[in-house]
Amino acid sequence: MKMKRLVLCAIVAFLIVLLICSNIQKKHTITLSNGEGRIKAEQIQPLWGTVKVSGDSDTDVVFTDIETGEQYIIGYITHGVTEKINLEKDKWYKVEVTTHNPHNRHSLYR
């Protein structure tokens, strides 16, 4: 009986942690969009070091380290594909997105 109760408590705790992490990710989603093909730069600071990038058009994404100027590039992403890039946690990056379709929306999940 105690084992069932322990397993049930562990499952509930896991689901609560999963829900909290999901909400944190939703709160830290940035949408970049305009109709000009080149989106003005935004600055981000990754929370965990992994950034997911997706878009609804063909896209190139460049992350530039604010301190060093070093660039990290996600090359051509097609519509509906999500790519991940590992960046240093707690550093600031400038994000530039070039699209190949003027009607676009891009999301960054930090």
Image: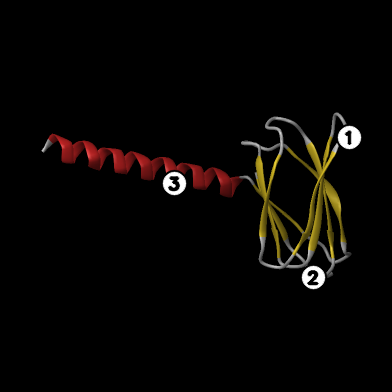
Secondary structure type for disc 3: helix
Indicate left or right for 3 with 59 as reference: left
Q: What is the x, y in percent for residue 85?
A: 70, 45
**Comparing labels 1 and 2, the label whose residue is closer to the camera:** 1
Considering only vertical position in the picture, is 52 above or below 34? above
Residue plotted at (14% across, 34% down) = 2
Q: What is the x, y in percent for residue 75?
A: 80, 55
Q: Residue furthest left?
A: 1
Instruction: Name which of mark 1 and mark 2 comes first in the sequence.
Output: 1
Number of marks: 3
The residue wearing badge 3 is 19
Secondary structure type for disc 1: loop
Kind of residue sitting beneath label 2: His
The residue wearing badge 2 is 103
Residue plotted at (22% across, 36% down) = 6
Indicate left or right for 53 with 72 as reference: left
Q: Could you tell me how far apart the alpha carbons at marks 1 and 2 are, in whole angstroms?
A: 29 Å
Residues under numbered marks 1 and 2 in contact, where contact means CB atoms less than 8 Å apart:
no
Q: What is the x, y in percent for residue 70?
A: 86, 36
Kind of residue sitting beneath label 3: Leu
Residue plotted at (10% across, 38% down) = 1
Considering only vertical position in the picture, is 63 above or below 55? above
The residue wearing badge 1 is 69
